[in-house]
Image: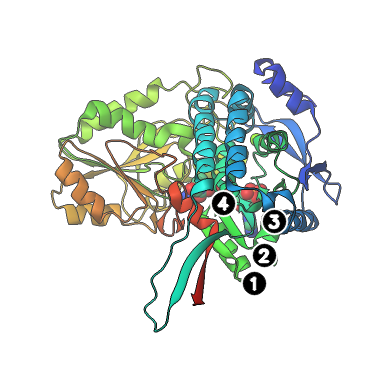
Amino acid sequence: MDVSASEGRLSSGAKAFIARRHKLLIDGHWVDARSGRTFAVFDPSNGQQIAEVAEGGAEDVNRAVGAARRAFEGGPWAKMKPVERGKMVWRLGDILEAHADELAELESLDNGKPVRDARTVDLPFGCELLRYMGGWSTKICGQQIPISAPGEWHAYSIREPVGVVGQIIPWNFPLLMAVWKIAPALAAGCTIVLKPAEQTPLTAIRLGELIVEAGFPPGVVNIITGDGTAGAALAAHPDVDKVAFTGSTEVGKLIVQAAAGNLKKVSLELGGKSPAIVFPDADLSVAIPGTASGIFFNMGQCCTAGSRLFVHERVFDKVMTGLAGEAARLKIGPGLDPETRIGPLVSDEQLRRVTGYLESGRQQGAEVVTGGKRHGNSGYFVEPTIITRTTPEMKIVREEIFGPVVCAIRYNDNDLDRIAREGNNTEYGLAASIWTRDLGIAHKLARKLKAGSVWINVHNFNDVALPFGGYKQSGWGREMGYEAIELYTETKAVAALL
Ligand code: NAP
Ligand code: MG
């Protein structure tokens, strides 16, 4: 397989991986799809094909769920002591770290993101997350519960793994999203069928190879590459106990409907239209680069991107000038170039979607401060873009663009309730950031914002221990921290009359 114009930048490990045949991981074996079908994977920096991957369908999902069920009900995984399970999850973190350079290259090649970001953000976070979740294996406890009914009782609760889980993930952080999903599920003792996004299947496949290397028994983690058909089959499967989904709100609603058949448990991490609110007293030397990174990091393809920037009129012009300067400094280029700060969007479809929003903004009368169009004519690059003179009804203000595009909105209010109402004026509720030196104001406003994460003087801040998830149409449930373990366990109450 030709590795496109990017080949020269790949290490030998990454090249060797690309050259392999890419199959499905079912029951510890790499197998072709039953249909024999494959799909092409593209380098978004130039649109060239880089690999072909097995296209799993409903039959393959069925086989994978069967393997996961057998691994859950019997065999070494079901009998493994928590400390052994924890060590295995930790070990996977170590193995990932040992392959971090190669994985960062593959991620950059497949997704387009700057290899520097993959190496300094996605990979370290993934390794740390595996170790953090591995640590929980030995600490998943029930309680002894006092009973008020007449008689003498011994009652307690047990937290048990929920069972076979289907995990469906998007393309914006392909490897990190995979780890984000599997780490707590494995720590809790579940077995998994993972469905990566069709745009970016490569690092999940490489992760599957490393999972086998780490010694996980067959069937504990199964990986089905394919499109939404495979995802839909997994969400609807009657022998899946829980489905965990990260992706668009639109598909999230389909997941909920599909899950209704057997009422499997559902957790959802969905879209966002997160506000970043800059107060006039903010330290602009922090707020300007912070809000710039809040929208431009990962080319804006972050569910938590600070895409609605509210700036007080006293500092509005200064912030616009500073932000435009930040945008101008970001070097646009192929992700594998270590100097690149803005890579291509993930796909032609996303390029069309984002430029479509830019066009709609223009038509509805918004003004472009900087950027506003495609960069170059090969690859899927879009300039970092700042838009002003918007109205709350415009599509670009209401809908998730998922690109490097921020709507800057001037405000002149000092009433926190009104500011919060504007910030909350969205169907989403994933994140928000507040930029001020007045921590009293910051904490008061934090309580008023309807968002799963509120950040003060920082944006896009995640930590393995911080619960993460959405209010409103941004999702159900919280990942990270102990709450992620709770997502993958059921509580059983045992009561004995003595
Ligand atoms: P998407 O279109 O919703 O796809 C997400 C995953 O669902 C992909 O693996 C996709 O498969 C699969 N899928 C598609 N149709 C399906 C169906 N009917 N049933 C089951 N699975 C189906 O989202 P995306 O465009 O890849 O990702 C961008 C979105 O993800 C944004 O809205 C973003 O906000 C959200 N996101 C949220 C978070 C969070 O934590 N809240 C994090 C990252 C991203 P194929 O792609 O292979 O068709
Ligand atoms: Mg790709």
Q: Which residue is mark 1?
A: 261
Of 76 and 212, the residue lying toward us: 76
Q: Is residue 254 left or right of residue 410?
A: right
Which residue lies at the image location 56% right of the left edge and 51% below the top edge?
188
> In the rendered structure, which disc, 4 or 3, sits on the residue that comes first in sequence?
3
Q: CA distance from mark 1 to mark 3?
A: 21 Å
Q: Residue furthest bottom?
A: 150
Which residue lies at the image location 75% right of the left edge and 38% below the top edge?
40
> In the rendered structure, which disc, 1 or 3, sits on the residue that comes first in sequence?
3
What numbered label is drawn on residue 236?
A: 2
Of 39 and 266, the residue lying toward us: 266
> In the rendered structure, which disc, 2 or 1, sits on the residue that comes first in sequence?
2
Q: Position of residue 90 (x, y in %)?
A: 57, 36
Q: Are marks 2 and 1 in contact (CB under 8 Å)?
A: yes
Q: CA distance from mark 2 to mark 4?
A: 23 Å
Q: Position of residue 480 (x, y in %)?
A: 46, 46
Q: Is mark 2 within 8 Å of ligand 1?
A: no
Q: What quarter of the picture does the N terminus occupy?
A: top right
Q: Position of residue 235 (x, y in %)?
A: 64, 61
Which residue lies at the image location 86% right of the left edge and 47% below the top edge?
36
Label 4: element kind: helix
Q: CA distance from mark 4 to mark 3?
A: 12 Å
Q: Which residue is mark 3?
A: 72
Residue type at numbered disc 1: Gly
Label 1: element kind: loop
Q: Is mark 4 within 8 Å of ligand 1?
A: no
Q: Which residue is mark 4?
A: 188
Q: How crowded is the residue under tag 1: few (<14 C-alpha within 10 Å), some, or many (20+)? A: few
Q: CA distance from mark 4 to mark 1?
A: 25 Å
